[in-house]
Amino acid sequence: MSDFAISQREVLYQGFFRMARYHLRFKLFDGGWSKTIVRELMERPSAVGVLPYDTIDDRVVLIEQFRPGAMAHTSKPWIFEVIAGIFSPDEAPDKVVIREAAEEAACEILDLYPICEYFVSPGGSDEYFHLFCGLIDTNFIDGIYGLDDEGENIRAFSLSMTEAQALLKQGKIQSSPAIIALQWLQLNHEWLRGLWQKKLEQQR
């Protein structure tokens, strides 16, 4: 038997995302069951993100785009982010992230390293995020990308690891995937550069 029980589910809204209302109970830590509670949940597909990193030049690629969810907290709701996109259950996250990198920043991913998987905001959404670091071989990336039919206007740009970490420390990066990815890269920076250097030497 499951440790939770859903007695009713109602779809309240169906658009780009779906909003549903659940009537449910769950097991308590003392062994009993909770009373029936009612919770609204935003249902949306899983998402994937990648931080492109050039180990030779020690540079990362970030994107910047308008985000309506940031309007309530700032007069300039353009957010620094990693490349990201949603995907369907029949797609593999690593394949999707390669496609998104090409669409949003004209990046060719040479190798992928999983960073983590996590629930974005499980108190009100079922979104599940797969995060990667993707190795690239490029000196500079700077341009405007995105799909017109999806209303995308994405600025992609490269910056040094030092510059990226400075933005992070200054609180100018406010997207959780970008924060997590840059912190992971800071911890694994030397290991990743050394590993890629060995691969390049073996290919010579």
Image (cartoon, rainbow, N blue to C red):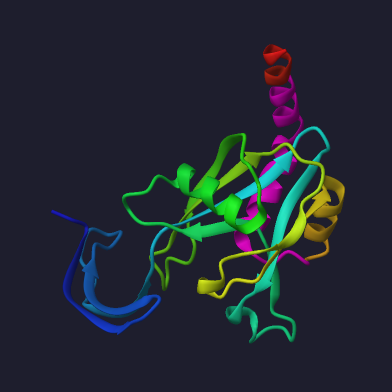
How far across and how far down the image is residue 38, in percent? 28, 81
Q: Main secondary structure of the magenta part?
A: helix
Q: Is residue 132 left or right of residue 2?
A: right
Asked if residue 60 is positioned above or below residue 200 in the image, the reply reads below
Image quarter of the C terminus: top right
Asked if residue 171 is positioned above or below residue 151 in the image, the reply reads above
Task: Please state the total of marks drawn on the protein image.
Answer: 0
Residue under the image location 83 percent in, 37 percent down: 57
Asked if residue 108 is positioned above or below residue 73 in the image, the reply reads above
Q: Is residue 89 left or right of residue 139?
A: left
Q: Is residue 87 left or right of residue 24?
A: right
Residue 196 is inside the magenta segment: yes
How far across and how far down the image is residue 40, in percent? 34, 80
- Image quadrant in which you'd find residue 151: bottom right
Asked if residue 154 is positioned above or below residue 67 in the image, the reply reads above
Question: Bounds of the magenta span?
Answer: 172-197
Of 30 and 124, the residue lying toward us: 124
Residue 121 is inside the magenta segment: no
How far across and how far down the image is residue 67, in percent? 62, 76
Of 25 and 143, the residue lying toward us: 143
Residue under the image location 18 percent in, 56 percent down: 2
Residue under the image location 31 percent in, 50 percent down: 90
How far across and how far down the image is residue 23, in percent? 22, 78
Residue under the image location 54 percent in, 45 percent down: 98
User: Can residue 156 be spotted in the picture?
Assistant: no
User: Can residue 140 be spotted in the picture?
Assistant: yes
